Amino acid sequence: MAAALRRAVHRAPADAAPRPAEAGVLLLGQDLRLLLENPAAKLWRDELAYSGAELPIAVLEVAARGRGAALPAHGRIRGRSGRWVSVHASPLSGGPYPAPLAVTVHPAPAPEVAEVLLLAYGLTPRERDVLARVVAGLPSPAIAMELRITAATVQDHLKSVFAKTGVRSRRALVATILTCERTVSTARLPGPPPGRTPCTGRKLHPPSPVASSCGRPTTVSRRRTER
């Protein structure tokens, strides 16, 4: 997964690609067949289509998880233009017939894309906790108190974060993360050579072996198992 995310982050968006001005809304039947859609949805389907199918595989995957679920399903997908897109799916209720499924498609907010970038670095949940507090300006003792760990453990996490992001100091780390956030907020992700970090171009720390996406569009669900 991390390797697929890095490959996706490295691809720069196409400046000339059309971008819908509003969210796409689709109504799907229980069999996941398209029933209705607004005009913007057609443009979003073209943005996410990687085959000749009526609905993009990424949309079908999120819709299948949202069908009959108590909570809406959510995915973040890199479109053909290189932009990140959010897809939400949840069943409707209140009618006499089997409830259709509502799917919305819109540009992914910058904080969500920043989270994907952090996942691309291969940071653990605890490392992301420490990183968030470093970016907020907290010193190691305060971070240790908030997370209920020792200051030495905080330093161990920071050393690991430094290695994975290719920096050597807190200042460089904060600059790297803030650069990522500014970059994704304008939807202009840079495209450094393979093996380099997404925002700085530094050499990327080799990740642990992970499963590949087998060439399919990369989706990232909020339903992750946290250690």
Image (tube, rainbow, N blue to C red):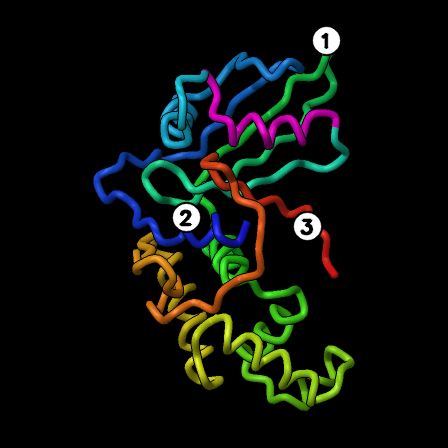
Q: Secondary structure at mark 2?
A: helix
Label 1 neighbour load within 10 Å: few <14, some 14-19, many 20+: few
Spatial CA distance of label 3 from label 2 is 19 Å
Spatial CA distance of label 3 from label 1 is 33 Å
Kindly identify the residue that appears in the image at 21 percent across and 39 percent down: 16
Residue 72: % across, % down: 67, 36
The circle on residue 97 is 1
Label tally: 3
Residue 65: % across, % down: 67, 31
The circle on residue 201 is none
Q: In this view of the protein, which residue sits in the foreground, 97 or 60? A: 60
Spatial CA distance of label 2 from label 1 is 40 Å
Q: Label 3: which residue? A: 224
Describe residue 136's horizontal placement relative to residue 20 as left or right: right
- The residue range painted magenta reads 54-68
Residue with the most extreme front position: 209
In reply to whether residue 46 is colored magenta, the answer given is no
Q: Label 2: which residue? A: 8
Which label's residue is closer to the chain start, 3 or 1? 1
The answer to the question of whether label 3 and label 1 lie on touching residues, with beta carbons closer than 8 A, is no
Which label's residue is closer to the chain start, 2 or 1? 2
Q: In this view of the protein, which residue sits in the foreground, 196 or 199? A: 196
Residue with the most extreme top position: 97
Three-letter code for the amino acid on which mark 1 is drawn: Tyr
Residue 202: % across, % down: 36, 71
Residue with the most extreme left position: 16
Indicate the quadrant containing the C terminus: top left, top right, bottom left or bottom right: bottom right
Q: Residue 44 falls in which quadrant of the image? A: top left
Kindly identify the residue that appears in the image at 49 percent across and 37 percent down: 214
Kindly identify the residue that appears in the image at 43 percent across and 74 percent down: 166
